[in-house]
Image (spheres, rainbow, N blue to C red):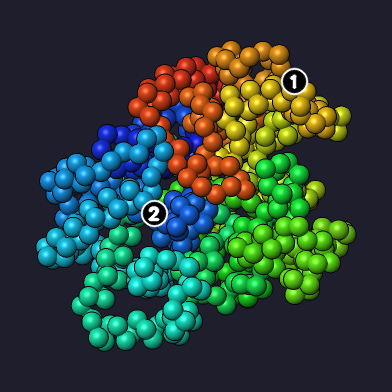
Amino acid sequence: MSIRLAGLLLPAFSPSREGDFGIGDTRSMRRWIDHCAEQGVGFLQLLPINETGSDDSPYNAISSVALEPLYLTCEAGEIPGLEASDVEEARRDFRECGLRVDYASSRRAKRGLLEKAWLRFQAGGGDPAFGDFRRSERGWLEDYCAYRWLMEKAGGSEVWDEWPEAWRSVSGARAFLAEELARERAAVAGRLDFHAWVQWLCFTQWKAVRAHAESRGVKLMGDVPIGVSRCSADVFFGRDDFDLDHTGGAPPETLFKHDRFIQRWGQNWGIPLYRWDRMEAAGFPWWRQRIAKLAEVFHIFRIDHVLGFYRIYSFPWQPRRNEEFLDLSDEEALVLAGGRLPRWSPRPDDSPAHCAANRFDGDVRLRMVLEAAGGAAVVAEDLGCVPDYVRPHLASLDIAGFRIPHWDVDEAGRVVPGDKLPECSFATYATHDHDSLPAMWADFRARSADPVVDEEERRKVTRDLALLAEFGGVEAEQDYGPTVKAELLAALFASRSRYAAFMITDLCDLTDRINSPGTVGPQNWSFRLSGNAEEIALRELGKLRAVLRATGRCSLMAESG
């Protein structure tokens, strides 16, 4: 019998507990694993948990391996060397900043605690397990620690092409570090050791979360972005593997009414392109390391923008230059960009030969990912401009692709019913980049009835609402409420899809957005659950157990309990 699991999307920063310093942590994750286990939810889906840069985006990490220290549980007994009095003092000084994550405040509080604990850890003689970690992880850890030390010398900035010119090259940075070690060995080595120690703590706590999930019969689902930040240890020290003259993104999209640049040129994510030929010739060591480390924590992982494994939309300029091109014609932009315009790389899907070549490239790369993943299951986010060959190819590799019901229609334009969805698929009404169910339903209804909305847009949202309602077996004229919600979730769980997931905001009837693509600001990646929202979530989870049981998605451990 095939596996059919229900999952809950809950970003690691979103749970809350008393005294958590304003951001979710590993202790909160263990508690949510318990909630899922008790109600038969088979997997808990997270966003990337790698260490982020100054924009706090989980999709813009400064390392493809290092984990985000903000998710550490900073409690006595959880961090060696940390005392209860340290934690209580930090809590007295910490000020909650409403229902959003204030990254600067949370980072300041937790960093202060880690620095105190580190001094005691050193004075107490350390732990042999830390030494083992340093030796076993040397392949990525040494460069990461050097990068973090260089960031400290640069005032905390990860933007290495704005560092002092003498450090911007790999040879210059290594020479600078060597000089400082010779001049002040104890101080410099101490900082390198500190950053390694923090990563040891991160991996120790997250592996404990995984072990707890396994003990409760719940799988953890992670996320691997298609790219890695230009301003990362990986790119800085391994820049031969990256094309720094081009950045990855997505083609123009008229739906982004708020952003003229995206409508004109597309989304410029700023991630450097891979030199796939060089990586492949070496056996893909960077990718194998990245996937293997991810699989140490997660049982399942999603490849974000898997289409980038076949081909990716490429920009010949960095995002900071976007405004220069906003109102230019193609001819003017061609001059300003040095004779290049945004295009598909390495080739478009404009001929059978090109489609075959792109499919072949994707096959080589995804087979490597599957091999590196070991026993971890792979899911592919295959939304956007999807070439015809992608979904059949993913299915041939047993990689579940995404199915969003109101986007999936048959040749007659009718919604594909749940019992006709492929078994090898991941069904969900939305991702973290979209509105929640209540927000989506209300928005579709409002815009479909708004005379100010242009006719084309009104027709589209009216159709989306009709398809969503048809899939759920409800009337599009109904107001969103418990009945509509129950029917929509029941239809999702009843589908043939291997995985069926809903967001925490769907569960709690919240209209908050986790991320608004094409925007930058504190409104993104900062959603938190209030205590009241968690109570609502637990009540709503309790209602789902009977539906999960009826649709065959209740996890076995919950059934036996």
What crowding class fits label 2: few (fewer than 14 Cα within 10 Å), some (14-19), or many (20 or more)? many
| Residue 474 in view (yes/no) | yes
Label 1 residue SS = loop
- Residue under the point 33% across and 60% down: 199
Label 2 residue SS = loop
- Residue under the point 27% across and 50% down: 109
Q: Position of residue 526 (x, y in %)?
A: 45, 42
Q: Mark 2 points at which residue?
A: 68
Give the tally of numbered discs. Answer: 2
> On the picture, is 407 further left or further right than 513?
right
Quarter of the rendering containing residue 476 = top right
- Residue under the point 46% across and 20% down: 540
- Residue under the point 51% across and 26% down: 510
Vertical side of 471 occupied by 273: above or below? below
Give the camera-side residue of 126 and 160.
Answer: 160
At label 2, the amino acid type is Glu
